[in-house]
Amino acid sequence: LNLAGGNANFGSPITLNGGALNHVGTGYTVLFAQLTVAADATITIANAGASDQLFVDAGITGAGNLTVTNSGAASVGIHFRNGTPGLFAGNLTVNGGHIASQGNGFNFQKSNVTLNDANWYMDGSQFATTGANEQMGSLSGNGNVLMGGFALTLGVGDKSGSHSGVLSGSG
């Protein structure tokens, strides 16, 4: 499925049953309906500017593993805003760019999260949104987590990982 950006809003639920969702072009796209990862899937964000973002506003669910590849500028990324905690049980890998969790956190409390050259913003600094506490099953990779004043809880469900990036903030 290709989403062309251009400051678009998409209101229908999306189920990834394997395969890929590609965000291409310029501008942002907002998914106002739930994203379900039913089988292992990939989201690719291939843009060049800071305003080229994918926003998931109704949460994520499913048990498939999700890989997010930000192949554009370092400022390109995916944002998970709101959603119901604990509905996503797959693992999450983010390659490059950034990821942000805002609003109601804990979308990834059952997940092993791997950040490969990617930054996770919990602090609300991306697009003037509200920061959020976050819980993850585990954290691995070399990416950085910017917590601001929010708390990050790791090891939910007795999971463990190996992380070599920086955790910053007072959370």
Image (cartoon, grey):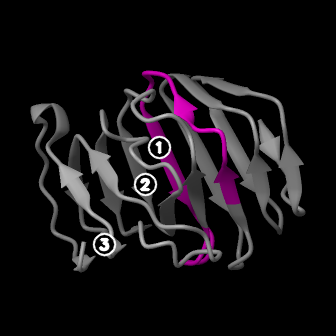
Circles 2, 1 touching at the beta carbon (< 8 Å): yes
Residue beneath label 1, please? 67
Which of the two discs, 2 and 1, labels the residue nearer the N terminus? 1
Rendered image quadrant of residue 37: top right
User: Tag 1: residue type?
Assistant: Thr
Secondary structure under tag 2 reads strand
Q: Mark 2 sits on what residue?
A: 94
Residue under numbered circle 3: 144
Residue type, label 3 = Asn
Mark 3 is surrounded, within 10 Å at the Cα level, by few (under 14), some (14 to 19) or many (20 or more) other residues, namely many
Answer left or right for 80 relative to 96. right
Q: Element at badge 3?
A: strand
Query: In what element is the residue under mark 1?
Result: strand
At 64% from the left and 36% from the top, the residue drawn is 20
Q: Amino acid at mark 2?
A: Val
Residue neighbourhood size for the residue with mark 1, other residues' Cα within 10 Å, grouped as few (<14), some (14–19), many (≥20): some
Residue at 31 percent of width and 37 percent of height: 111
Residue 139 at x, y = what percent? 22, 52
Q: Earlier in the sequence, mark 3 or mark 2?
A: 2
The correct choice, above or below, for 43 with respect to 110 in the image is below
